[in-house]
Every structure is written in structure tokens, then in C-alpha cells.
Image (spheres, coloured by chain):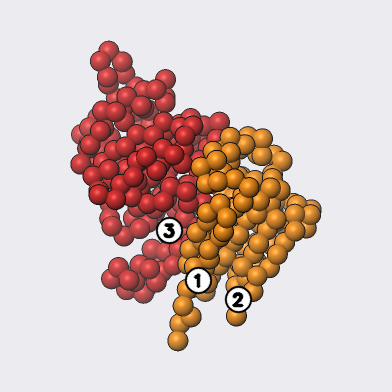
Chain colours: A red, B orange
Amino acid sequence: MGLYGPPNGGKTTLANRICEDWLGETMGSVSRIAHETREIQIKEQIVVKSGNKELMFNLVDTPGIATKIDFEDFMKSGMKKEEAKKRAKEATKGVISSIKWLDEMDAVVVVLDSTKDPYSQVNITIVGNLAARNIPVLIAANKVDLKKSNIEGVKEAFPQYDVIGISAKYGNQLEDFYAALFKLLD
Amino acid sequence: MLTLRFIPYNEIHALSSYDRIKKIVDLAKEDQIILIEGKLKKTEEVELIKRTMEEISDKFKGIEIAEVNPQENKDVQFFQKVKDEVINFLLGDRIGFTVIGPATIVKEIKQDPNKIQLLTKDKKK
């Protein structure tokens, strides 16, 4: 199962939450600076339990998909020029990896920042490609702990998919999320 | 000076997917804003993103892209888009149009049913 979405949506925070809940360990580092995850990360054989039911899957955390990467944006976050250029280069390779891995997915959770406009072309392209490949999709509208969060906006944008509002950072509504995972992967 | 390059459906769809994407990226790298009649296939969109990432440099920072279908409102447009994904998977679509701009010039593309706004970046002194 893959975690896909634009940068800074909270994919790795959610991956860490899932791994902490069911493996007792984290998956990757998180940062306020975009493109913190620049390589595919995999945790194998995660077992989620609900009552008598068990669900086992390999979790793939992917770099955020973007249409533009500017090393100067990283410099605005305090990085030196060479470090920013290196991060930008790695970020471009990360986006390419994410796209290449699309064909390997049996199911995908698209992680979106619910405080942002869900109608971005990147979101449309990701969901459109998953639909075209007949890959089951669950939308995680993340960051519901923030005031600007608009889950209804995400639901309106994706009326044909299950949308679960969560806060991966604080663990809000994770029960609903795991219940939706059973539905997605069953 | 901004250059807007219009590409009619017949011109873009006469090309193979590879050449179509190459043409778009090449024009974006020349700092042109591209207005394409119709839409790319979803698989071409990810291929466009992939190719764009391969071309990113100090000078070329990527693209902004938006699809516009003026005949439908925002909700219906998106719903219709996803509903038609499989149908359009192989056929593509000539309804609406696609706007692509180099990220060094176009900061953001905002769309609503009746208009499209290209927010451009200030030229550095």
C-alpha cells in the first residue's frame, strides 16, 4: 500500500503513526521544509488488527509529487546554496521514483493537506492515474487539527472516494482511518 | 515580455506521446506559456511531470499546469474528470484546454468555471 500526495501533506507523519501503532517504530524523518522524503521508504509486513480481523501489508512511503522544484525555496528556509541545490536534485529524483512506483501499488492512500485547495492539478493527476490503473484509493484529509482545515472541501472534490479526516501528527480519528483501510484492502 | 503559444488539438495530437511531451517541455524551457486545445491523457500528465523533473536546472524550475473545462462548474468538472478517466485513458480529450507555464514565470494558476488566472512572478532586478 502506497502513501501518495503532494509535498508536505503529511505522508511520512502518517507512515510514522501507522508504524508506531503497529510495529512500535518510526519510518522516516519529518520536516516543515518540503521534500524531506526524497527516497522511497518501505516497511514490510505491517499487521493492523481490528477485533478478530487482521490486515497485513507492506507500507510504501513516497516522496511528494510536484511539478516544480526551486532550490532557492530551500535557501529561504535557511539552507546554504550548495545544500539547497543538492536537496532540489534529490527531490527531482524522488518525484520520478514516486511516479515509477505507481505501477507497483495494490492500493493507495492519497494524503492531502486539508487546509489547502484540493483542486490542484497534481492532486487531479495523481488520483486520475490511480483511477486509470484501477488502483483502489482512500483519501486521507490530513491536518484536521488546524483551524483552516476543510474536510468538506476535500469531500466535494473527491465525491467518488472515501475521504477520512485525520491528524496524523496527533493521532486524531485514526480509528476511522484504520476501519477505512480494512474496507480498502479487503 | 510574456509569450503565449497556442497549440491546436490537431497539431498536438498528431504527435506521439513522447514528442508531445518533449514539445511541451521544450517550449516551457523557452519561457513560453502554452495553451493547448484539449487535454493530455492522465498517463501523459505523469510522464510530463517526470520529464519536467529530469530537466530541472538552475534556470528551469519546472512548470505550473492546469486543465480548464469552461462548460462545467468546478465540482462537476472534477467529478466528470475522474468519471471519464478510464474512457480518456487511451483516447485523450479535446474538450476544454490545458495551460502550462514555466515556474520561473508563472507562480500559480487559479481556475474557476469562467476564467483562468495566471499569477506571474515579479522580474528580479
Q: Is the C-beta separation of discs 2 and 3 under 8 Å? A: no
Against A124, is B58 above or below? below
Q: Residues within 10 Å of mark 2 (few under 14, many from 20)?
A: few
Q: Residue B111: percent from the left, percent from the top?
A: 52, 56
Residue sitting farthest toward the top: A52
- Quarter of the image for residue A51 reads top left
Name the mark on residue B2: 2
- Quarter of the image for residue B8 reads bottom right
Q: Earlier in the sequence, mark 1 or mark 2?
A: 2
Q: Is the C-beta separation of discs 1 and 2 under 8 Å? A: yes
Label 2: chain letter: B
Visible residue check, residue A105: yes
Q: From the image, tell me which residue sits under label 3.
A: A91
Q: From the image, tell me which residue sits under label 1.
A: B120
Please name whichever residue, A66 or B123, is drawn nearer the observer in this view of the structure.
B123
Residue at disc 1, secondary structure = strand
